Amino acid sequence: MKQRDHNEIPFLIGVLGGTITTEDTDRINANSSPTPFGEPSAALQKVDIGHANVAFMARHGLPHAIAPHDINYRANLWTLHEASVSAIVAMYAVGAIRNDLAIGDIVIPDQIVDYTWGREGSFNATLGLKHFDFSEPFSPVVRQHLLSSAKESGHSVHSTATYGCTQGPRLETSAEIERLRRDGCDLVGMTAMPEAALARELNIPFGGICLIVNAAAGRGDGPIRHQEIGLAISQNSANLLDIVGRAARALRDSFR
Ligand code: HPA
C-alpha cells in the first residue's frame, strides 16, 4: 500500500481524543469502516472545535468503552490517514509526576518514554521495514502551533515535558511512578504510544496536548479518585479545546 504525501493535501486536521472529548456532531462516515488492520475505535466524525472543522477520532470508542491496551491504534491512525488529514493533534488526560505540574495545567509534551507492551505498534508489514528517526516524537511544527495558539488564547501552558506511557488499564503503583521520575518522565498517561510512532510511519505531523487530571500515584494526598479526575476534566476541557481549535485553524491555513 502506498503512503500519501500529507504535505500535498490541503486542509483537514485530525484530532484524537479520549477522556477529553467534544460534542458529537456530523459523522464523516455513518459507520466506522474496517481498515486492513481491523475496526477503528469509532467512525470518524466531523466536529467543530473553536470554529475549526476537524476529523475527530474517539480513541476509546463511542460510548467510551475501549481500554488503552485494547485500542486498535493502527486502525485509528489508518482511518485518519485515509481521510487525508494534513496533521494530527492528540489530546491526553494525564497524571502529574513533576512537582511543578498541578491539576488543571495544560502541557505540550516534547518527549516520550514507552513502557507499553504487546500493542500492535507498526505498519511494517504493509509499508516495509523502516527504522525511522524518532528522536523528536512530536512534530516541532505542530508543537509550535500549539504553543503559539496557547499564547494567543492567554492560557499558560508548560512547553516541554516527557510523557511516560504505561500499559494500564490499572493505574501505577507509587514505586512505578518513582521509577518513571528517575527515568525523566514528567507526566504519565496510557495512550500516546504507539499513536505517535504510527503517525510518524504514515508521515503525518503529530503533536500532543495534555491536561493534568490527577497527581500520579504516591504524589497526592491519598488514592487517585475518579471523581477528582472527572472534575478536572469538566473544569478545564474548554481551555484545552480553545487551544486545539486555534491550532487546528492555524495548521489548516499553513497547509492551504
Ligand atoms: N496514570 C496513567 N494514566 C493516567 C493517569 C495516571 O495517573 N491519569 C490520567 N491518565
Image: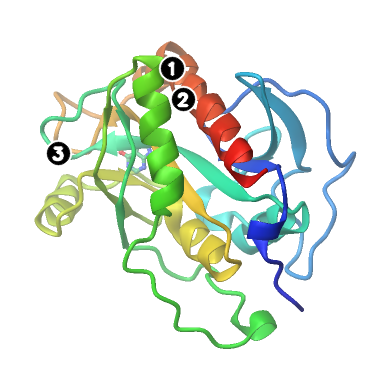
As measured in the structure, the alpha-carbon distance from the residue carrying label 2 to the one carrying label 1 is 7 Å
Asked whether the beta carbons under mark 2 and mark 1 sit within 8 Å of each other, the answer is: yes
Residue 223 locus on image (x, y percent):
24, 29
Which mark lies nearer to you, 2 or 1? 2
Kind of residue at badge 3: Arg
Kind of residue at badge 2: Ile
Label 1 environment density (alpha carbons within 10 Å; few <14, some 14–19, many ≥20): some
Residue 187 locus on image (x, y percent):
26, 43
Residue depicted at 78% across the width and 43% down the height: 43
Residue depicted at 19% across the width and 53% down the height: 176
Residue depicted at 73% across the width and 55% down the height: 79
Residue 12 sits in which quadrant? top right
Residue under numbered circle 3:
98
The answer to whether residue 233 is above or below residue 77 is above
Where disc 1 sits, the SS reads: helix
Q: Is residue 82 left or right of residue 51?
A: right
Depth order, front residue of 18/167: 18
Depth order, front residue of 99/55: 55
Label 3 environment density (alpha carbons within 10 Å; few <14, some 14–19, many ≥20): some
Where disc 2 sits, the SS reads: helix
Which mark lies nearer to you, 3 or 2? 2
Assign ligand 1 to one image quadrant.
Answer: top left
